[in-house]
């Protein structure tokens, strides 16, 4: 205040000397930005620069196990094994910014209905649906994509699917909306694991409003969702392990072709060596025949 009051009469240097204030402090202008150098937006992996979003997806994969309690130091070690040149400070920052550190958990309100029986005895189509997410590595892009598939258990038919860089709760809701419009999901039992996209309140509320029953597998029990797990194993063996995808788009095109082949042309041993579509259609014919018998009897 003294410097401001007398700076028109005496030089700023002299006034700063009088009050024992350095000129750098006097001329300092605070900034709204964080101090220091701006964090880097890329990381080196296999001598190539990849975005931090790619690093983040790999971090999520590393800590995705049900019993995984890795902190940022263990995650750093795993990333280095994947040929990343990264230090633990950067890993900590990325995990902290995205709520991935230990103790920062996804919370959901409301009760979850867990499965009562491991095996599903489906007697008709659209009685049970099961779904799960599979990671698919696209090497040229140095990142994972996510595949969400929804299967009708009775026929083993894949009713719908999405393949994207990330899958959020609205993606799950929109996929169920499409299935509801085409087939109807009222009174359908939907089985899934405890992924963040599935336990989200918005997803639970949507399925409840559609009068579908959602049930969750127990933690670390993939065998309770064995039908979709088995399909993803088939997909891995018949497509992913045999072909090299040039890009996410290339993978999506090939997945589209595979799903068409799987539903309409691939004989399924558990179905008696017929295709899922044939099983689906035979169920429809059976239902139509029973309806006609009921009409005649009345």
Image (cartoon, rainbow, N blue to C red):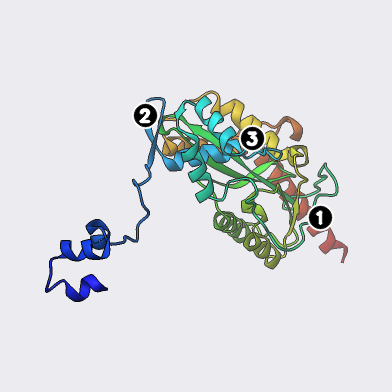
Position of residue 132 relative to residue 5, above or below, is: above
- Helix, strand or loop at mark 1: helix
User: In whole angstroms, how far apart are the C-alphas of marks 1 and 2?
Assistant: 63 Å
- Helix, strand or loop at mark 2: strand
User: Looking at the picture, how far across and down is residue 166, in whole percent?
Assistant: 51, 47
Is residue 251 visible in the rendered image? The answer is yes
Contact between labelled residues 3 and 1, with CB atoms less than 8 Å apart: no
User: Looking at the picture, how far across and down is residue 81, in whole percent?
Assistant: 53, 25
| Residue named by callout 3 | 232
Front residue of 165 and 122: 165
**Which quarter of the rendering shows the N terminus?**
bottom left
Residue lying at 36% horizontally and 29% vertically, measured from the top left: 48
Which label was assigned to residue 48? 2
Residue lying at 71% horizontally and 65% vertically, measured from the top left: 208
Which mark is first along the chain, 3 or 1? 3
Contact between labelled residues 2 and 1, with CB atoms less than 8 Å apart: no
User: In whole angstroms, how far apart are the C-alphas of marks 2 and 3?
Assistant: 30 Å
Front residue of 268 and 210: 210
User: Looking at the picture, how far across and down is residue 250, in whole percent?
Assistant: 43, 35
């Amino acid at each position: 205040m003294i410097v401001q009051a007398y700076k028109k009469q005496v030089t700023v240097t002299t006034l700063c000397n009088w009050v024992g204030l350095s000129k750098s402090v006097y001329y300092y202008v605070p900034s709204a930005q964080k101090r220091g150098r701006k964090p880097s937006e890329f990381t080196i992996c296999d001598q190539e620069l990849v975005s931090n979003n790619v690093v983040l997806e790999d971090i999520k994969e590393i800590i995705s196990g049900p019993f995984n309690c890795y902190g940022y130091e263990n995650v750093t070690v795993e990333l280095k094994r994947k040929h990343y040149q990264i230090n633990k400070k950067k890993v900590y920052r990325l995990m902290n910014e995205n709520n991935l550190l230990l103790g920062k958990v996804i919370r959901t309100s409301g009760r979850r209905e867990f499965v009562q029986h491991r095996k599903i005895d489906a007697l008709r189509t659209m009685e049970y649906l099961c779904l799960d997410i599979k990671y698919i590595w696209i090497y040229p892009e140095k990142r994972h994509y996510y595949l969400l598939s929804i299967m009708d258990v009775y026929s083993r038919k894949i009713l719908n699917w999405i393949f994207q860089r990330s899958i959020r709760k609205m993606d799950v809701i929109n996929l169920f909306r499409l299935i509801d419009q085409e087939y109807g999901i009222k009174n359908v039992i939907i089985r899934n694991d405890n992924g963040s996209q599935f336990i989200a309140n918005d997803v639970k509320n949507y399925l409840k409003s559609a009068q579908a029953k959602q049930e969750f597998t127990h933690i670390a029990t993939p065998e309770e969702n064995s039908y979709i797990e088995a399909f993803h194993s088939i997909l891995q063996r018949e497509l992913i392990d045999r072909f090299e995808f040039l890009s996410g788009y290339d993978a999506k095109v090939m997945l589209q072709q595979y799903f068409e082949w799987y539903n309409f042309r691939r004989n399924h041993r558990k179905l008696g060596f017929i295709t899922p579509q044939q099983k689906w259609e035979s169920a429809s014919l059976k239902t139509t025949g029973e309806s006609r018998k009921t009409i005649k009897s009345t």
